[in-house]
């Protein structure tokens, strides 16, 4: 599933089929919204159900990109639909990333929670490597074959990953810490107490922690985005024998 760093590169290769100025940040911008929405309902409904929903949303959006008609076929609707699919991917990633780390953390022993949560962050780089490898294999096709149908196959293959992921997610039990918190909330409700919205509780009690976590995450995220766009720019501007139509024209990656 092409998201984040791999999405910048993979969608950049087929940008001319949809429009001449692809902004790969569409999915990235939607991530905070996804984190807020799925984080809220994850605290209310449960971690497991939200993780199943985010994976389904990601898989469906990735598959839809693979079947989208191009600009030549439906005109300006092509970029509109592509951006909509990327926004859905971004929303799903926003909920998936934090939810997966939280689920791993809450299932681990107290002294191993940091280590367990760190494994969720390995999914992004691992997915980027896998997506890049698959796209590299299909980009070896002749230009016309790649731009007509070859680029679609990696996105269509995301349905396989969706099936595997959902099978694993359904087998995972709900977070034990969430079950304890839900029982405590039910007890407070029975005794006439009130329960504040989880997001408001976090913002009110832990503003410093939120700021530190956001600033700490910016370094890695900015670096990976710069590396992806710089790589695409170098691939498309280094002296080749002839320009390749697979390089996006007018995109951020090809601007000096």
Image (cartoon, helix red, strand yellow):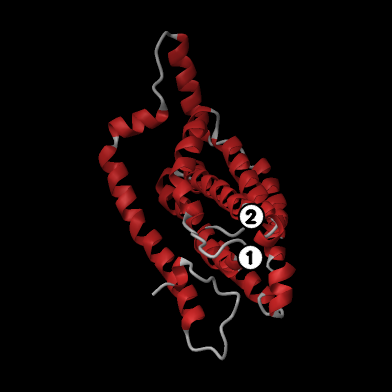
Extreme-top residue of the structure = 192
**Between 7 and 18, the one nearer to me in the picture:** 18
Q: What is the x, y in percent for residue 171?
A: 67, 42
Secondary structure under tag 2 reads: helix
Left or right, residue 9 beside residue 118: right
Q: Name the residue: 47% across, 53% down.
A: 28
Mark 1 near mark 2, Cβ–Cβ under 8 Å?
yes
Left or right, residue 190 beside residue 2: left
Left or right, residue 177 beside residue 62: left
Secondary structure under tag 1 reads: helix
| Residue 228 appearing in the image | no
Q: What is the x, y in percent for residue 141?
A: 71, 78
> Counting other residues with Cα less than 10 Å from the Cα at mark 2, is it few (<14), some (14-19), or many (20 or more)?
some
Q: Name the residue: 53% across, 88% down.
A: 240
The numbered disc on residue 150 is none
Asked if 238 appears above or below 227 in the picture, the reply is below
**Between 175 and 81, the one nearer to me in the picture:** 81
Left or right, residue 207 beside residue 17: left
Gap in Å between the C-alphas at discs 1 and 2?
9 Å
The numbered disc on residue 78 is 2
**Between 228 and 110, the one nearer to me in the picture:** 228
Q: What is the x, y in percent for residue 9?
A: 54, 68
Asked if 1 appears above or below 171 in the picture, the reply is below
The numbered disc on residue 17 is 1
> Counting other residues with Cα less than 10 Å from the Cα at mark 1, is it few (<14), some (14-19), or many (20 or more)?
many
Locate the C terminus and report the quarter of the image it occupies.
Answer: bottom left
Extreme-bottom residue of the structure = 241
| Residue 29 appearing in the image | yes
Asked if 134 appears above or below 169 in the picture, the reply is below
């Amino acid at each position: 599933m092409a998201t984040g760093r791999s999405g910048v590169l993979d969608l950049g290769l087929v940008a001319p089929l949809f429009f001449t100025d692809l902004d790969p940040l569409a999915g990235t911008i939607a991530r905070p919204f996804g984190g807020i929405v799925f984080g809220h309902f994850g605290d209310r409904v449960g971690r497991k159900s939200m993780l199943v929903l985010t994976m389904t949303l990601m898989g469906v959006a990735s598959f839809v990109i693979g079947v989208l008609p191009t600009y030549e076929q439906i005109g300006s609707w092509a970029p509109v639909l592509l951006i909509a699919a990327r926004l859905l991917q971004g929303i799903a990633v926003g909920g998936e990333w934090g939810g997966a780390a939280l689920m791993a953390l809450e299932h681990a022993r107290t002294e191993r929670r940091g280590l367990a949560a760190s494994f969720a962050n390995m999914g992004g780089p691992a997915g980027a490597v896998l997506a890049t490898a698959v796209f590299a294999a299909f980009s070896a096709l002749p230009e016309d074959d790649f731009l007509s149908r070859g680029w679609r196959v990696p996105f269509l293959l995301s349905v396989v990953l969706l099936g595997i992921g959902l099978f694993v997610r359904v087998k995972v039990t709900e977070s034990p810490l969430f079950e304890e918190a839900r029982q405590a909330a039910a007890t407070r409700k029975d005794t006439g107490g009130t329960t504040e919205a989880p997001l408001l509780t976090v913002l009110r009690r832990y503003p410093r922690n939120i700021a530190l976590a956001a600033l700490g995450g910016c370094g890695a995220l900015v670096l990976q985005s710069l590396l992806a766009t710089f790589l695409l720019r170098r691939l498309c501007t280094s002296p080749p024998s002839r320009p390749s139509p697979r390089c996006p024209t007018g995109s951020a990656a090809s601007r000096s």
